[in-house]
Image: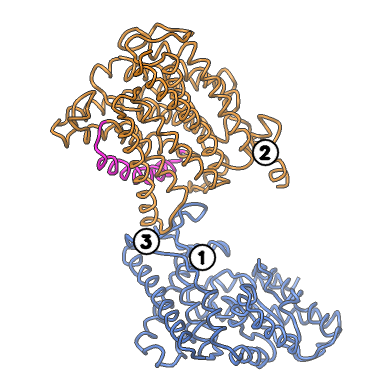
C-alpha cells in the first residue's frame, strides 16, 4: 500500500526534522504533497483524468505552517467547473486524500473540516456563494467557519482560488460589523497564570501538572495575528509572517519583533519539551521538566500573548465604535 | 406547667426537626456530588441508615452516651422510654430526639467515605456498629459528663463529637475501600469524576445551612435569654465567611471561581463554627469561617494528591474544618462566653484551653479512626469484602444493590 510507504518516510524523517520548527513544517508539506499526488494517481486510474483545474488547501495549524510533530487534518478543496460529474469526481478525490493522510499519520479532524465533507469541497462559484451566506448569516457557527477559512493556504493546485475567496471576505460591505463578530468569537481565552503569578497547570486527568500550551500559549498569538490579518487584508497565513506584514502604524517595529520572538520561542518550547507520543500529548507542556529560567520565560510568553491579544482587541473595539471600516 | 420548661422543649424540638431535615441536605449533597448511576442508591441508603441508627441509638446509644456511668461510658437508660431526665429543664423525649438527630448526622457523614463503591450490606452493618461503638463513647466524653467534659473541653454543638467523629470513620472507610475505578491513572495522576448535579449540591448547602440553625442554636438546649439568637448569628457569619474565602482562594490559585469548591467552603465554615458558635464574638466567627474556607481548599487537594479518594470531600469539610473549629475555641473563646472551660489565647487564657482542645481533637479523632477501622475490617471479613465487584461498580450501585436506576431513562440510554 502506497500510503504506508509515505508513513514510513514520515517516521524516518520526522525525528531529525523535529529539531527545528521550519524544517518540520516543510517536511509536513512534503508528506502531504506526496499523499495528494498518490491519491490523484489512484483516482485518475479509477475514474479517469482530472476534469478541470482545482486547488487543495490546508487550514488550522497546517494552514499557518505551525504544526507540531503530530497534527490532525484540516483541509478543503476548490474546483473550477461546476457539474454533477465534476462534483462527484472531486468529492471522491477529497475522500481519498483524507483517507491517505490518515494512513500517513494525520488523524481525522473531529469537527469534519476536511475535503471529504461536501461543506469543504465545492466549486469556485459554490464557494463564493457559501462565503456570502456565511457572512450574511453571521451566526456563531458560520463566523467560526470563516475564521477557519482565513487560515487557508493552498498546498496543491491553483494558487489564486483561495486568494479570490479571501479577498471576497476582505472586501465585504460591512467589514466593521464582521470584524466585531470575528472578535467576539475569538474572545474566550484560557487563563494561564493565577493572581499569585503561578502557572495554571491541569489539575486532573492524564496531563495533570502540565500546561495546556495550545490554548493558553498559542491561541492568543494566533487569534490576534489572524484578526489583524483580516483587518489589514493580509493573505499571509502564518502568525510570524502576519505579524511581519502588519503596518507599523498599527504596531511598532519593536513590538513586532518582541511578539515574533516570543511566539517563536513558544513553538520551540513545544517542540523541545512536550511529549510527542500522540496528537494530544503534544499540546501539554510538562512544567516539572523545565528549569526555573524556562518557567520564567514561559510565563513571559503567556503574559506577552495576552498583552498582544488585548491590544488588538482594544484597537478593534476602538475602530468599531468610531465607525471605521 | 413551668413556662421555661415548655419554651425550652418547643425550641429544642424545633432544633431537632431542623437537624433531621439536614439528612435531606446530605441526600442532595451526596447525590449531587456523585454520578447518576448511583443516585437512587445514595438517596435511599441515607434514609435507611438513619432509620437503623435511630433504633440503635434508642436501644443502646443514648444510654452509652448520656446515661449515668463513669468517665468513659454511660450505663443507664437503655431502651429509653421517654421519661424526663433529672437536671434538664426540658422534655426528656425532646432531648432524646435532639441527640438522636446528632448521632444520625454523624453517621451520615461517615458514609460519605463509602460513596459509589461500598456494598449495601456494609452500610447496614456499619450503621449498627457505629451507633453503638463509635459515636456514643465520644458523645459521652464531651457532652455526657465524661473525662473530657471534666477537663472543660469546649465543643458547643459538635465540631468534634459529630463532625470529626463522622469524618474519621469516613477516613477509615476510604482507606479500606480504596479509590473508585477511574479515579487515578497509572502514572498516579487523578481524574476529576464530576458530580452529576451542581444544583442539587447548591440546594443541599442551603438546606444544611438552614438546618444548622437547629444544630448550633438548638444546642443551647434552652430558650433562656434567647441566647440561641446570638449562636445563630455566629453560625450564619461562619458559613458566609467560609463561602467567600473558598471562592477567593479558588480564584486566586486555580484562576476560576469553582462552584463545588465554594459550596465546600460554606460547609467548612459551618462545621468550624459549630464548636465555637456559643463561645466567641461575631468578628471571630467571621475569622473562623474564613480560615475554614481556605483550609478546605488545600485539604481537598492534599487528600487527592495522596490517592485518598473522598468523593464528597467528607474528610476535608468535616474533618479538617472540624479540627480547626474545635481548636479555634482555644484562641477565640471569650471570658464572658466561656460557660465551659477557660477563655482562649487571645482573651488572656494563655495556652491552657488550646491544649485542652487539642487533647479533645487528638483523642476523639484517633479513637473514632481506630475503632471504625477495626469494625470495618471485621465487617469486611464477615461479609467477604465490603466493596462491590468491578462490574457492579461500573453498572452503578442503583442497579447492583437495588435493581433499578434513580434516573432510569438517562442511565439506561448510555
Q: Nearer the viewer, mark 2 or mark 1?
A: 2
Which residue does the numbered mark 3 point to in the structure image? A194
Which colour is chain A painted? blue
Crowding at dot 3, Cα within 10 Å, few <14 / some 14-19 / many 20+, comes out as: some
Callout 3 and callout 2 share a chain: no
Q: Residues under labels 3 and 2: Cα distance? A: 39 Å
Element class at badge 3:
loop
Which residue does the numbered mark 2 point to in the structure image? B395
**Split into 4 quadrants, where in the image is the N terminus of chain A?**
bottom right
Callout 2 and callout 1 share a chain: no
Which colour is chain B painted? orange
Q: Nearer the viewer, mark 1 or mark 3?
A: 3
Element class at badge 1:
helix
The residue under the point 79% across, 78% down is A91
The residue stretch that appears in magenta: B279-308
Q: Residues under labels 1 and 3: Cα distance? A: 20 Å
Residue B297 highlighted magenta (yes or no): yes
Amino acid at each position: 500500500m502506497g500510503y504506508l510507504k509515505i508513513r514510513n518516510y514520515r517516521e524516518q524523517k520526522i525525528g531529525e526534522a523535529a529539531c527545528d520548527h521550519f524544517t518540520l513544517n516543510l517536511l509536513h508539506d512534503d508528506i502531504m504533497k506526496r499523499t495528494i499526488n498518490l491519491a490523484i494517481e489512484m483516482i485518475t486510474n479509477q475514474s479517469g483524468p482530472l476534469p478541470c483545474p482545482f486547488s487543495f488547501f490546508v487550514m488550522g495549524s497546517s494552514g499557518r505552517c505551525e504544526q507540531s510533530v503530530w497534527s490532525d487534518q484540516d483541509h478543503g478543496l476548490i474546483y473550477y467547473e461546476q457539474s454533477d460529474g465534476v462534483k462527484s469526481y472531486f468529492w471522491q478525490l477529497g475522500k481519498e486524500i483524507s483517507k491517505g493522510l490518515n494512513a500517513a499519520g494525520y488523524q481525522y479532524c473531529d469537527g469534519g473540516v476536511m475535503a471529504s465533507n461536501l461543506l469543504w469541497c465545492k466549486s469556485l462559484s459554490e464557494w463564493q456563494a457559501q462565503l456570502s451566506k456565511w457572512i450574511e448569516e453571521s451566526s456563531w457557527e458560520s463566523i467560526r467557519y470563516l475564521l477557519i477559512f482565513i487560515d487557508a493556504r493552498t498546498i496543491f493546485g491553483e494558487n489564486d482560488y483561495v486568494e479570490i475567496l479571501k479577498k471576497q471576505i476582505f472586501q465585504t460591505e460591512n467589514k466593521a460589523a464582521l470584524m466585531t463578530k470575528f472578535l467576539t468569537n475569538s474572545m474566550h481565552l484560557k487563563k494561564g497564570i493565577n493572581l499569585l503569578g503561578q502557572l495554571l497547570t491541569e489539575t486532573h486527568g492524564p496531563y495533570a501538572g502540565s500546561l495546556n500550551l495550545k490554548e493558553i500559549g498559542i491561541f492568543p498569538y494566533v487569534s490576534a495575528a489572524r484578526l489583524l490579518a483580516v483587518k489589514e487584508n493580509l493573505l499571509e497565513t502564518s502568525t510570524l509572517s502576519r505579524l511581519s506584514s502588519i503596518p507599523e502604524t498599527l504596531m511598532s517595529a519593536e513590538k513586532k519583533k518582541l511578539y515574533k520572538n516570543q511566539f517563536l520561542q513558544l513553538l520551540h518550547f513545544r517542540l523541545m519539551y512536550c511529549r510527542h507520543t500522540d496528537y494530544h500529548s503534544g499540546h501539554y507542556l510538562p512544567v516539572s521538566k523545565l528549569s526555573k529560567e524556562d518557567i520564567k520565560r514561559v510565563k513571559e510568553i503567556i503574559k506577552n500573548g495576552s498583552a498582544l491579544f488585548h491590544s488588538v482587541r482594544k484597537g478593534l473595539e476602538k475602530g468599531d465604535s468610531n465607525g471605521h471600516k | 406547667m413551668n413556662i421555661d420548661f415548655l419554651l425550652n422543649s418547643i425550641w429544642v424540638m424545633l432544633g431537632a426537626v431542623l437537624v433531621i431535615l439536614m439528612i435531606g441536605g446530605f441526600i442532595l449533597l451526596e447525590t449531587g456530588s456523585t454520578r447518576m448511576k448511583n443516585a437512587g442508591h445514595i438517596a435511599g441508603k441515607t434514609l435507611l441508615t438513619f432509620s437503623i441508627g435511630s433504633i440503635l441509638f434508642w436501644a443502646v446509644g443514648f444510654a452509652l452516651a448520656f446515661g449515668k456511668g463513669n468517665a468513659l461510658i454511660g450505663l443507664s437508660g437503655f431502651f429509653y422510654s421517654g421519661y424526663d431526665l433529672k437536671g434538664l429543664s426540658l422534655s426528656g423525649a425532646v432531648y432524646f430526639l435532639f441527640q438522636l438527630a446528632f448521632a444520625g448526622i454523624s453517621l451520615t457523614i461517615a458514609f460519605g467515605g463509602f460513596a459509589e463503591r461500598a456494598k449495601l450490606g456494609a452500610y447496614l452493618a456499619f450503621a449498627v456498629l457505629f451507633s453503638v461503638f463509635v459515636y456514643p463513647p465520644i458523645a459521652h466524653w464531651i457532652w455526657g459528663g465524661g473525662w473530657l467534659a471534666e477537663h472543660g473541653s469546649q465543643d458547643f454543638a459538635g465540631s468534634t463529637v459529630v463532625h470529626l467523629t463522622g469524618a474519621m470513620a469516613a477516613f477509615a472507610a476510604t482507606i479500606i475501600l480504596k479509590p473508585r475505578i477511574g479515579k487515578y491513572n497509572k502514572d498516579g495522576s487523578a481524574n476529576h469524576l464530576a458530580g452529576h448535579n451542581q444544583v442539587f449540591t447548591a440546594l443541599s448547602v442551603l438546606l444544611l445551612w438552614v438546618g444548622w440553625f437547629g444544630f448550633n442554636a438548638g444546642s443551647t438546649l434552652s430558650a433562656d435569654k434567647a441566647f440561641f439568637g446570638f449562636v445563630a448569628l455566629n453560625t450564619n457569619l461562619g458559613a458566609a465567611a467560609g463561602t467567600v474565602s473558598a471562592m477567593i482562594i479558588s480564584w486566586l490559585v486555580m484562576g476560576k471561581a469553582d462552584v463545588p469548591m465554594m459550596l465546600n467552603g460554606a460547609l467548612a465554615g459551618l462545621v468550624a463554627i459549630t464548636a465555637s458558635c456559643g463561645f466567641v464574638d461575631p468578628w471571630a466567627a467571621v475569622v473562623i469561617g474564613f480560615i475554614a474556607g481556605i483550609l478546605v481548599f488545600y485539604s481537598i487537594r492534599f487528600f487527592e494528591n495522596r490517592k485518598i479518594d473522598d468523593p464528597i470531600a467528607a474528610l476535608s469539610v468535616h474533618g479538617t474544618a472540624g479540627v480547626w473549629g474545635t481548636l479555634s475555641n482555644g484562641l477565640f473563646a471569650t471570658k464572658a462566653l466561656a460557660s465551659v472551660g477557660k477563655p482562649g489565647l487571645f482573651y488572656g487564657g494563655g495556652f491552657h484551653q488550646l491544649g485542652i482542645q487539642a487533647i479533645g481533637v487528638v483523642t476523639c479523632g484517633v479513637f473514632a479512626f481506630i475503632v471504625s477501622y477495626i469494625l470495618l475490617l471485621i465487617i469486611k471479613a464477615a461479609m467477604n469484602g465490603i466493596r462491590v465487584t468491578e462490574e457492579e461498580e461500573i453498572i452503578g450501585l442503583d442497579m447492583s444493590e437495588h435493581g433499578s436506576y434513580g434516573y432510569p431513562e438517562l442511565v439506561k440510554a448510555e
